[in-house]
Amino acid sequence: MNEAVVFTLNGKEVRIEGPPAMPLLFALRGQLDHKGTRLGCGEGHCGACTVTLDGVPVTSCDLPISAIAGKNVGTVEGVLAADHPLAAALIRHQAGQCGYCLPGILTRAAALIDQGQCAEDIRNALDANLCRCGAHGRIMAAIQEVAS
Ligand code: FES
């Protein structure tokens, strides 16, 4: 049975409907046209689907919509709309190769930078975001530049 869920998405109140166990990721991409958040493993292991929930980075592929009622969800679209300095730094450092993991990395790292975490702590936190391409060093250089 479907359930209606109201929450705040990038500062705007939105309403979705679906089975309570439906992952937030599916609602973001399928109902709210926020396709920047990616589906990777679908099991909470790769970080491609990272969003923030009340400011804390979480994976959205294993987050049921029943858990987000009344909460604040942030996606990569919100990070870009806010002109976060990390987005510009990633471009400056040419930190995109295939780019599939980048929205999740940007979302997590931007949230941690905003919390005042240092580059080393952010590097450790990014263990939750898998990247298998050659851009990882450039991604880290961009984070180092903005976090320091
Ligand atoms: Fe969510 Fe991999 S798709 S962690």
Image: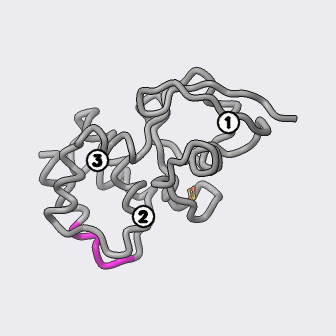
- Position of residue 90 in the picture relative to residue 68 (left or right): left
Residue at image location 11% in from the left, 46% down from the top: 148
Q: Is residue 33 magenta?
A: no
Separation of disc 1 and disc 2 at Cα?
23 Å
Separation of disc 2 and disc 3 at Cα?
19 Å
Which numbered dot is residue 101? 2
Residue at image location 39% in from the left, 47% down from the top: 76
Whether ligand 1 has any atom under 8 Å from the Cβ at mark 3 is answered as: no
Give, as a three-letter code, the residue at label 1.
Ile
Q: Is residue 136 magenta?
A: yes
Rendering coords of residue 81 (x, y %): 30, 41
Which of discs 2 and 3 lies nearer the camera? The answer is: 2
Front-most of residues 102 and 26: 26
Q: Is residue 62 visible?
A: no
State if disc 1 and disc 3 touch (CB < 8 Å). no
- Quarter-wise, where is residue 114 in the image? top left
Rendering coords of residue 112 (x, y %): 31, 40
Which residue corresponds to mark 3? Answer: 121
Determine the secondary structure under disc 3.
helix
Whether ligand 1 has any atom under 8 Å from the Cβ at mark 1 is answered as: no
Magenta region, residue range: 133-138
Determine the secondary structure under disc 2.
loop
Residue at image location 22% in from the left, 50% down from the top: 86
In the rendered picture of this protein, how many numbered marks are placed on residues?
Answer: 3
Q: Residue furthest bottom?
A: 134
Determine the secondary structure under disc 1.
helix
Which residue corresponds to mark 1? Answer: 65
Give, as a three-letter code, the residue at label 2.
Cys
Q: Is residue 5 visible?
A: yes
Give, as a three-letter code, the residue at label 3.
Asp
Q: Is residue 93 above or below residue 128?
A: below
Q: Is residue 44 above or below residue 27?
A: below
